[in-house]
Image (cartoon, rainbow, N blue to C red):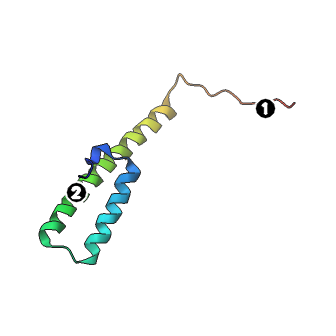
């Protein structure tokens, strides 16, 4: 049984989406199976978009933190 989209990593979702698209493009799928795969693909896309949005929010928060000042990094020679 396939994992739920929310339990897949972003990369796993993309890989599965590529597989679904390739399978559907072959055209050798029954209408019923094609609809099931299309539905799975939509769920994967929505979950992937949500993960991307979360990552963008985290990056934005990290870049906008006023409390975090970056200190200069110096390398001490031996």
User: Which quadrant of the figure contains the C terminus?
Assistant: top right
**Residue 63's spot in the image, x, y percent?**
51, 34
**Residue 61's spot in the image, x, y percent?**
45, 32
Rendered image: mark on residue 75? 1
Within-10-Å neighbours for mark 2: few <14, some 14–19, many 20+: some
Q: Vertical placement of 73 versus 5: above or below?
A: above
- Tell me where residue 40 sits by quadrant: bottom left
Residue pushed farthest left?
A: 32
Marker count (numbered) = 2
**Residue 1's spot in the image, x, y percent?**
23, 52
In terms of secondary structure, where does tag 1 sit?
loop
- At 28% from the left edge and 44% from the top edge, which residue is drawn? 6
Within-10-Å neighbours for mark 1: few <14, some 14–19, many 20+: few
Side (left or right) of 66 relative to 58:
right
Q: Vertical placement of 55 versus 68: above or below?
A: below
Label 1 with label 2: CB-CB less than 8 Å? no
Dot 1 or dot 2: first in sequence order is 2
Side (left or right) of 52 relative to 65:
left
- Tell me where residue 56 sits by quadrant: top left
In terms of secondary structure, where does tag 2 sit?
helix
Mark 1 → mark 2, Cα distance in angstroms: 51 Å
Residue holding disc 2 = 40
- At 60% from the left edge and 25% from the top edge, which residue is drawn? 69
Rendered image: mark on residue 47? none
- At 56% from the left edge and 25% from the top edge, which residue is drawn? 68
Given this view, does label 1 or label 2 mark the residue nearer the observer?
2
């Amino acid at each position: 049984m396939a994992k739920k989209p929310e339990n897949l990593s972003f990369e796993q979702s993309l890989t599965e989406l590529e597989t679904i698209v390739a399978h559907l493009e072959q055209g050798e799928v029954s209408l019923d199976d094609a609809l099931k795969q299309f539905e799975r693909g939509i769920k994967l896309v929505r979950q992937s978009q949500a993960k991307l949005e979360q990552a963008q929010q985290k990056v934005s928060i990290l870049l906008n933190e006023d409390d975090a000042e970056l200190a200069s990094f110096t390398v001490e020679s031996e």
